[in-house]
Image (cartoon, rainbow, N blue to C red):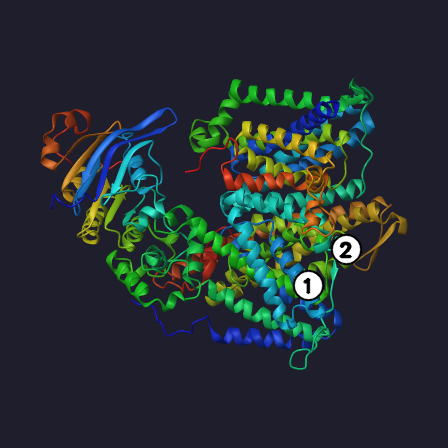
């Protein structure tokens, strides 16, 4: 029972972190049609910057400063690079962010080295939030959940209740009309791109010290975030939310299950041994298979429901 | 027109909603083979939606669409095309990086049976090449034979658009605002072209230019708020009071073309 | 007027014969064993990059997971060779690349069905996901994928083929180039077939294709399979070449990224672009990586600039200038090219110095504080060095920008003259992949 509850909470916190990442990606994609391949690179950058800043002035200022710095970098990139490529179409836009991801990775390794950095939790977030049946649920993870939910709320309010949010929503489908109404649409795009990058960086700030901060972190979470976005339905925030939680919980549970098909079969009396055909496959424990579960989900979703969980039907 | 033959295109109680908005609210229409029908109506009446439904781009919410007596609602665009219906687009929809000749040849590859062949050379397909040459002449773009489609003038691109549409030899042709954006003289020449290339075929065309409508069409269907308000010969439609109120305004045609 | 039907079927014979002769003769021009290794790698990477361009340049499909098909081709080939060595499956080595091709085809058919259900950015993400899926699965089946040590083989088995045992690198090179030549011819021929042309149409306007009787998804799917077939051939040749296949390298996202990088760099809009890309890939990974630790950073920056300023790649830059030369106006630009190159060099020297200084500090501080750079000894501890490098970079940058602007004006003027001369004379449009369009586009948005 405690395994279930703790795993569920862990899964939800991981899922919410995934959502923080995939929501920024979805927003940028919906707004600008650009799939930002460097999105998880901004995540990584946020973690590393927070590590350096918190080493100097502490974690809590870093929580604010790091995302702002990354937002600036994102905005500058949009203005001086992405914008130039816009006229060539969506594929070159994706490619330019692809190139950026490599450059960021190299620069990060250059500045901070290739090994894991000791980005640690501040004292306020260390230790358990509560103890359930003898297993602890750490404060840091609940902080992730809290931040993610607050962020979601803030973005939703911004988009639906403020003027700039309305302009953004309008520019999403009719940028020329919005521009002819006097709004500076390129500046709006720059804000959106910077904002999305800031969200990614924020995820990095709080994820980097709960999980690990190393050069491979961008790639490790990158493909899963893309899976989340496709499974949830391209352009659907609610879909991304659902898919993030689903995949987060699925992976967390799977990683702790040591049973395999073989042990399952044996439990019901079917003898399975090294001589059995396909025993290599049957012997795989669920935990060993866990890394590919998101991708299996992707393939299944594409076969049975190509538009994703909450995606719109394409015309 | 033989009344015993099945209509080329028939719509029965056709409805289409997008979310809560119902655009097509119950359309009934029967177009006989070889008939030339112009579909007119105010903006927002659903004319393009109707074309999109008939050609398979959208699936209807309810109702039936029949092509030569067989149901085609719910089929994909290519399935409908293979059954003998082709359409053009209001916003030019051609293959920008291919030449005029290549565009036309692509339009007829399937109907000539070449399908997904990767074991034959395009240069060796005598019948396809000859037909594509013929089409280039028909749409009067021989001088632009090897020009990339994206480098053509607007009117030339519209001509190519029609060329691709008729290339496959479909018997039922749908033209969506073929003269959109053209000057008066261009329109006149274009209507001539349309008449020539659609000889003997069933033609449905969405048009705003009344001069074109009265010049091309055997019958006019008036679409208002997603319903067919009238479907009759031009004189009758012109005299129809309800149509006059809803759309035509003045008795004489020649309203300026507008998108 | 009808087009002449009498010209040669598959392009101009002369070029193909020249290509064949070049392939045959290269090892005699570059005689070192390092050169032979690199030429061998270039041989099969040409096949793989061309196969990648069937997706990217011809079909408009951006794939981040092409290494899956070349990699699985490698694995099945190497297992086939091992089985052949044991006598279970008597296949002579000259046929092994076809085993790779068939496995590439098989997996492309299997995975491609799902992958091609979507297009555009979604397609790209799916290829990424499937690439990760296969890479992750490789860890789960060490029996097939060989675990950390990979799978090894001996390519010298059986009775040989016409007296050739393929033990020496030279013989392997010739095996590779034979397949390279044939694959290139076949892939070029493909661009001239109905399916090839419809693939281009799908790239240009996927929606319209459905209204002329074709299923867009089917066209993409078949194109995907053909690309997978040739990728498998390339992968098999790689396995033969190295006699070892390792999952973490062969199936990696980095390798897929490499194909994308260099195919794009070489030029996706011309048929021969990926061939240039393959050559650069080998030069970069073998030579450049030895010269500097920062090679990936340099590549990333070059890639960024290419996407922004020359999206047609090197091939398009070449063809633009070929066009200018054909109109006998190239001499007007010589001076400007020289100036551009000179200022770019200054800029590059400055920027590279800075990058190398930082790299040295970060990664090699153990070996002292000075580093060799272009024959100079630079001291990373001295402020003067840093300021000097910065100054060179800034000066180079400003000069380059100034020259670039003037060059752009000159270029525009030359293009204008060419366009005016071309009003009644349309050039031969016999260039697949929208080549002429890329020339025109790129020339209008001149560097």
Which chain hosts label 2?
A: C
Q: Is residue B222 above or below residue C142?
A: above
Q: Position of residue B126 (x, y in %)?
A: 32, 68
**Number of other residues with Cα within 10 Å of mark 2, as a class: few under 14, some 14 to 19, many 20 or more:** some
Identify the mark nearer the N-term, 2 or 1: 1
Q: Position of residue C44 (x, y in %)?
A: 63, 65
- Residue at 71 percent across and 70 percent down: it is C85
Q: Quadrant of the N terminus of chain C?
A: bottom left
Give the CA separation, mark 2 to mark 1: 33 Å
- Residue at 46 percent across and 33 percent down: it is A312
Q: Is residue A54 above or below residue A76?
A: above
Which chain hosts label 1?
A: C
* Residue of label 2: C292
Q: Is residue C21 above or below residue A80?
A: below
Q: Position of residue A134 (x, y in %)?
A: 81, 20
Q: Who is closer to the viewer here, C417 or B64?
A: B64
- What secondary structure is marked by label 1? helix
* Residue B126 left/right relative to C215: left
Q: Who is closer to the viewer here, C14 or A281?
A: A281
Residue C257 is marked as none
* Residue of label 1: C78
């Amino acid at each position: 029972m405690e395994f279930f509850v703790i795993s569920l909470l862990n899964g939800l916190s991981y899922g919410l972190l995934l959502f923080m990442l995939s929501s920024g990606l979805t927003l940028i994609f919906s707004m600008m049609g650009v799939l930002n391949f460097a999105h998880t690179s901004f995540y990584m950058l946020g973690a590393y910057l927070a590590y350096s800043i918190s080493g100097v002035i502490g974690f809590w200022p870093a929580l604010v400063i790091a995302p702002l710095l990354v937002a600036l970098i994102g905005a500058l990139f949009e203005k001086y690079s992405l914008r130039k490529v816009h006229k060539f179409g969506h594929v070159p836009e994706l490619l330019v962010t692809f190139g950026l991801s490599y450059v960021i990775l190299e620069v990060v390794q250059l500045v901070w080295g290739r090994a894991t950095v000791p980005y640690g939790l501040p004292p306020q977030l260390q230790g358990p939030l509560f103890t359930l049946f003898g297993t602890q649920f750490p404060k840091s993870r609940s902080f992730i959940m809290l931040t993610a939910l607050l962020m979601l709320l803030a973005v939703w309010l911004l988009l639906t209740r403020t003027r700039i949010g309305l302009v953004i929503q309008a520019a999403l489908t009719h940028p020329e009309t919005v521009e002819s109404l006097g709004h500076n649409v390129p500046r709006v795009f720059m804000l959106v791109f910077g904002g999305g990058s800031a969200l990614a960086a924020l995820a990095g700030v709080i994820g980097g010290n709960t999980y690990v901060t190393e050069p491979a972190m961008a790639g490790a979470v990158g493909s899963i975030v893309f899976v989340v976005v496709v499974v949830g339905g391209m352009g659907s925030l609610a879909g991304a939310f659902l898919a993030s939680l689903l995949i987060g919980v699925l992976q967390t549970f799977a990683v702790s299950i040591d049973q395999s098909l073989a042990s399952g079969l044996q439990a019901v009396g079917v003898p399975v041994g090294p001589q059995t055909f396909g025993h290599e496959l049957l012997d795989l424990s669920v935990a060993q298979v866990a890394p590919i579960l998101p991708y299996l989900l992707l393939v299944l979703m594409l076969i049975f429901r190509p538009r994703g969980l909450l995606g719109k039907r394409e015309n | 027109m033989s009344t015993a033959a099945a209509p080329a295109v028939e719509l029965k109680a056709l409805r289409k909603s997008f979310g809560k908005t119902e655009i097509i609210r119950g359309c009934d229409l029967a177009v006989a083979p070889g008939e030339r029908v112009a579909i007119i109506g105010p903006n927002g009446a659903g004319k393009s939606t109707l074309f999109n439904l008939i050609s398979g781009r959208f699936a209807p919410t309810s109702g039936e669409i029949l092509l030569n007596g067989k149901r085609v609602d719910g089929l994909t665009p290519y399935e409908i095309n293979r059954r003998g219906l082709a359409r053009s687009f209001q916003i030019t929809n051609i293959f920008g990086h291919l030449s005029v000749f290549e565009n036309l040849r692509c339009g007829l590859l399937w109907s000539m049976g070449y399908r997904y062949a990767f074991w034959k050379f395009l240069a060796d397909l005598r019948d396809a090449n000859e037909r594509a040459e013929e089409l280039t002449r028909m749409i009067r773009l021989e001088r632009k034979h090897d020009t990339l489609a994206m480098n053509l003038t607007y009117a030339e691109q519209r001509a190519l658009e029609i060329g691709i549409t008729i290339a496959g030899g479909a018997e039922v042709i749908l033209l969506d605002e073929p003269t959109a954006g053209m000057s008066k003289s261009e329109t006149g020449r274009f209507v001539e072209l349309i008449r020539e290339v659609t000889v003997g075929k069933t033609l449905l065309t969405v048009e705003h230019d009344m001069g074109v409508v009265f010049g091309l069409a055997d019958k006019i269907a008036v679409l208002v708020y997603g319903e067919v308000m009238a479907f009759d010969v031009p004189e009758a439609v012109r005299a129809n009071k309800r149509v006059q109120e809803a759309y035509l305004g003045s008795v004489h045609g020649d309203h300026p073309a507008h998108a | 007027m009808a087009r002449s039907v009498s010209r040669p079927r598959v392009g101009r014979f002369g070029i193909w014969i020249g290509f064949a002769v070049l392939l045959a003769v290269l090892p005699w021009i570059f005689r070192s064993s390092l050169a032979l290794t690199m030429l061998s790698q270039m041989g099969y990477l040409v096949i793989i990059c061309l196969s990648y361009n069937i997706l990217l340049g011809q079909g408009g499909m951006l794939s981040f997971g092409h290494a899956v098909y070349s990699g699985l081709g490698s694995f099945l080939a190497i297992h086939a060779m091992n089985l052949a060595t044991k006598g279970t499956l008597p296949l002579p080595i000259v046929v092994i690349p076809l085993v790779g091709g068939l496995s590439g085809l098989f997996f492309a058919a299997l995975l491609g069905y799902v992958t091609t259900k979507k297009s555009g950015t979604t397609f790209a993400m799916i290829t990424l996901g499937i690439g990760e899926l296969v890479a992750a699965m490789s860890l789960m089946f060490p029996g097939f994928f060989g675990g950390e040590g990979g799978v090894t083989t001996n390519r010298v088995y059986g009775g040989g083929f016409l007296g050739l045992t393929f033990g020496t690198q030279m013989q392997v090179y010739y095996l590779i180039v034979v397949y390279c030549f044939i694959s290139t011819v076949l892939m070029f021929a493909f661009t001239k077939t109905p399916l090839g042309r419809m693939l281009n149409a799908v790239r240009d306007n996927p929606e319209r294709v459905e209204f002329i009787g074709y299923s867009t998804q089917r066209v993409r799917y078949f194109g995907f399979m053909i690309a997978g077939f040739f990728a498998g051939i390339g992968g098999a040749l790689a396995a033969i070449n190295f006699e070892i296949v390792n999952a973490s390298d062969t199936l990696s996202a980095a390798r897929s990224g490499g194909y994308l990088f260099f195919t794009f760099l070489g030029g996706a809009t011309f048929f021969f672009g990926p061939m240039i890309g393959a050559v650069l890939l080998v030069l970069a990974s073998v030579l450049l990586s030895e010269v500097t630790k920062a090679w990936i950073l340099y590549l990333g920056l070059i890639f960024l600039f290419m996407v922004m300023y020359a999206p047609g790649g090197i091939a398009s830059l070449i063809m633009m200038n070929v066009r200018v030369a054909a109109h006998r106006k190239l001499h007007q630009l010589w001076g400007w090219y020289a100036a551009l190159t000179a200022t770019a060099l200054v800029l590059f020297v400055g920027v590279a110095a800075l990058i190398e200084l930082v790299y040295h500090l970060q990664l090699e501080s153990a070996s002292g504080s000075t580093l060799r750079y272009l024959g100079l000894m630079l001291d990373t501890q001295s402020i003067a060095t840093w300021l000097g490098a910065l100054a060179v970079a800034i000066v180079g940058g400003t000069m380059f920008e100034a020259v670039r602007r003037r060059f752009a004006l000159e270029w525009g003027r030359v293009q204008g003259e060419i366009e005016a001369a071309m009003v009644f004379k349309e050039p031969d449009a016999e260039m697949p992949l929208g080549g002429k369009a890329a020339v025109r586009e790129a020339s209008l948005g001149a560097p």
